[in-house]
Amino acid sequence: MTDSSAAGNDTNNRIVAVTLDEESIGRSGPDIEHERAIAIYDLIEENLFAPEGAVAGPYTLHIGITGSRLMFDIRKEDGTPVVAHLLSLTPFRRIVKDYFMICDSYYQAIRTATPDKIEAIDMGRRGIHDEGSRTLQERLAGKVRVDFETSRRLFTLISVLHWKG
């Protein structure tokens, strides 16, 4: 059932809780764990998340990997299922691989490199992150409406899940 009167009310079209499938999460270092915690915190604080054709939220989101697909299990705040979307991981593989390589360079640089070098690496890191965010928005088009900042935070979480092994 669609609540068309709520479709334009973005105050209810938001995520209020995010969980990650523990079986999907690979071991990661403290830098990645820190990025994940910040992304979840920032995502909960401010986001736009509106599943197409669904009653307005707020929503909870469980993200995991099932087979070779990314799973978004979307529920109402009370746990009532809304929809589950499965997205191919293929469009994200190269982006995530590049993102982790540059993140490794960035984390090494902040310990020893000059400020100019750190800034240059960080600009590259943000560029790859933006590419992943745009790809996610494209993959969610027609399924879930998200703004760019929400997509950025979701891409960070997907990156953590994507590299289980």
Image (cartoon, rainbow, N blue to C red):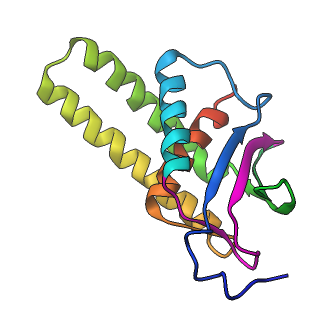
Percent x, y of residue 146: 55, 65
Give the residue drawn at x 62%, y 72%.
141
Q: Is residue 21 above or below residue 12?
A: above
Above/below status of 54 relative to 131: below
Residue 74 found in image quarter: bottom right
Q: Residue at x 38, y 31 (%)?
A: 102
Residue at 27% x, 19% y: name it: 109
Q: Is 13 on the left-hand or right-hand side of 74?
A: left
**Magenta stretch: includes residue 53:** yes
Splitting the image into 4 quarters, where does residue 55 fall?
Answer: bottom right
Q: Position of residue 30 (x, y in %)?
A: 50, 16
Taking the image as shown, residue 162 lies to the left or right of residue 134, namely right
Q: Which residues are magenta?
A: 46-67
Q: Is residue 148 above or below residue 21?
A: below
Quadrant that contains the C terminus: top right
Rendered view: 113 above or below 52: above
In magenta stretch: residue 129: no
- Name the outermost residue toward the bottom: 5
Name the spot of residue 68 as percent of width and height, x first.
78, 44
Residue that protrudes farthest toward the top in the picture: 112
